[in-house]
Amino acid sequence: MYKKLIAFSIAAVMMVACTTVPITGRRQLSLVSDAQMMQMSYDAYDQFLKENKLSRDAQATAMVKRTGQRIQRAVEQYMAANGMSDQLQGFQWEHNLIEDDQVNAWAMAGGKTVTYTGILPVAQNETGLAVVMGHEIAHAIAKHSNERMSQQLAQQFGGQTLSALAGSQPGVAQQLIMTAYSAGSTLGILKYGRNQESEADRLGLIFMAMAGYNPQEAIPFWERMEAKSGGQAPPEFLSTHPSAGTRRANLQSYMPEAMKYYKK
Ligand SMILES: [Zn+2]
């Protein structure tokens, strides 16, 4: 009886606390408000920048900022043209290059991205970088970190919203936030699920295409990433992403859709 009641209330919460990912139309759980998510993200991002070194390479830094802004503007235009600008409310876009040999990049809620200098040789050029940044920006647009935290709330706290949990058990809520956005850690972001990675690949191709970068370059880029991992333990950036074969097949299946958005 109680179990049924609990299951019912979780279902009820899930019905009202859903959002839809742009373009893919996938419904996702959302138990954290965008404003809360972004505040956590901005705090963690500032902390990360304090504890890491910005690249002194002016040319590479300019390329990262230019690529991020081109993709960002293309997404903004698309969202405006399709009546979805409200989904970008509160975004404080920022793109930084940090001096670090890791083959890595990530984005946080609200459009804060970090690219590591270690990924630049793999990117080779601006289009290769657009593959990376398109993918990371897609995680932010699809609000994957909110979804990840919401899934944790559903699994561990009976589907309470973050606000409700913070009201009843502030210490527990704080702990959840800390582990989700471990400020100052080298990772700094939640690990995404496999379906989120595939979704970011699909949207990433579309976003880079909208910004005028040829999405077909994503296939050789991911091959270079695979070669870089050399069959050993893959670099951190690859470890949470689909295997090379699966990814290649997925990318090829997403390509016709992405090419529709590509204007040279
Ligand atoms: Zn990813």
Image (cartoon, rainbow, N blue to C red):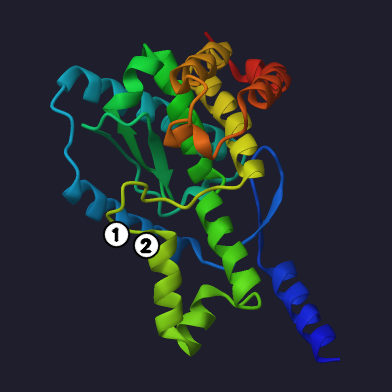
Residue 219 to residue 168: above or below: above
At a point 49% along the width and 78% down the height, the residue shown is 163
Percent of width and height locating residue 237: 45, 34
**Image quarter (top left, top right, bottom left or bottom right) of the N terminus:** bottom right
Q: Quadrant of residue 90?
A: bottom left
Residue 117 to residue 87: above or below: above
Asked whether mark 2 lies closer than 8 Å to ligand 1, one says no
The numbered disc on residue 43 is: 1
User: In this orientation, which residue lies closer to the viewer: 182 or 207?
Assistant: 182
Q: Amino acid at mark 2?
A: Met
User: In this orientation, which residue lies closer to the viewer: 249 or 21?
Assistant: 249
Percent of width and height locating residue 128: 43, 16
Q: Quadrant of residue 97?
A: top left
Question: Circle 2: is it few (<14), some (14-19), or many (20+) Cα within 10 Å?
Answer: some
The residue sitting at the left extreme is 56
Q: Secondary structure at mark 1?
A: helix
Q: Amino acid at mark 1?
A: Asp
Is residue 74 shown to the viewer in this render? no
At a point 69% along the width and 17% down the height, the residue shown is 252
Q: CA distance from mark 1 to mark 2?
A: 5 Å
Q: Secondary structure at mark 2?
A: helix
Is residue 24 shown to the viewer in this render? yes
Residue 192 to residue 69: above or below: below
At a point 56% along the width and 57% down the height, the residue shown is 148
User: In this orientation, which residue lies closer to the viewer: 101 or 54?
Assistant: 101
Horizontal side of 18 relative to 36 (left or right) equals: right
C-beta proximity under 8 Å, tags 1 and 2: yes
The numbered disc on residue 40 is: 2
Percent of width and height locating residue 182: 36, 59
